[in-house]
Image: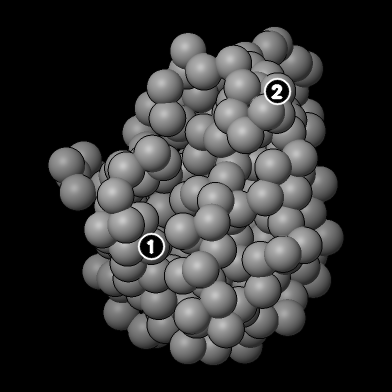
Amino acid sequence: MARSLTTIFGAPVQSAVESSEECPALSNLEQFRIFCVCTGNICRSPVAERLLAVRLGPGVAVSSGGTYGVLGAPISPPMARLLGQAEIASADFSARRVTPEELRAADLVLTMTKEQRRDVVDLAPSVVRRTFTLREFARLLDGLEPDELPGRTSAERLRVAVRSAATRRSPSAADEIDDPYGGSEADYVRAFGEIDDAVTTIARIAGGRL
């Protein structure tokens, strides 16, 4: 989605680029917090949010926002239809802008592109080691052996996974999910499928529900 947009669906778009004071993550040890990020928070990040919440189950709280959030907008209709086909609700969603406070409170931040990852780190530099693109994190987890992620719950295993992934980063051209907004139905299906595949890998490794 182009950054030059000022309105979409008649809703205001706000930039999330602003300076802030750094502080440590606020996570409760019994709950693991994932924050998903895309540009407008109407296509990719809401789908990642809803799929992760369903697949990872209790103990993992998932939310999302956009670097240029389309405030109050619903999930884009093509993505809402695809979520509906997966029997996942989308009607209660309302897009918003990511804030530095939410980023710092997250145990894991998942973006859709490398540029969004840079934007996130600009907003909250302290989250650099726990911020990945969604496909990057799935790829890094896919290379782990089961005994490398000890823990009884998804939350416990994800805490270990984030630390492990941060030490094993390697660039890949396949780590991004292109924005389908304004594209064809096939573009939405492709993006949804890429998100679903990455979430499935994360849920399988973390011991969540498939």
* Earlier sequence position, callout 2 versus callout 1: 2
Q: Position of residue 3 (x, y in %)?
A: 47, 18
Residue identified by numbered label 2? 12
**Residue at the (51%, 68%) spot, across then down:** 81
Q: What amino acid type is highlighted by mark number 2?
A: Pro
Q: Quadrant of residue 112?
A: top left
Does 141 appear above or below 87? above
Front position in the image: 36 or 88:
88
Mark 1 element type: helix
| Mark 1 neighbour density, 10 Å: few (under 14) some (14–19) many (20 or more) | many
**Residue at the (55%, 51%) spot, across then down:** 76
**Residue at the (83%, 60%) spot, across then down:** 28
Residue identified by numbered label 1? 192
Residue 141 visible in the displayed image: no
Q: What amino acid type is highlighted by mark number 1?
A: Phe
In which quadrant will I find the N terminus? top left
Mark 2 element type: strand
Front position in the image: 115 or 153:
115
**Is label 2 or label 1 in front?**
2
Q: Position of residue 131 (x, y in %)?
A: 50, 42
| Mark 2 neighbour density, 10 Å: few (under 14) some (14–19) many (20 or more) | some
Q: Position of residue 109 (x, y in %)?
A: 56, 46
Q: Position of residue 186 (x, y in %)?
A: 26, 58
Query: In 3D space, how far apart are the residues under numbered discs 2 and 1 (Cα atoms)?
Result: 25 Å
Residue 130's disc number: none
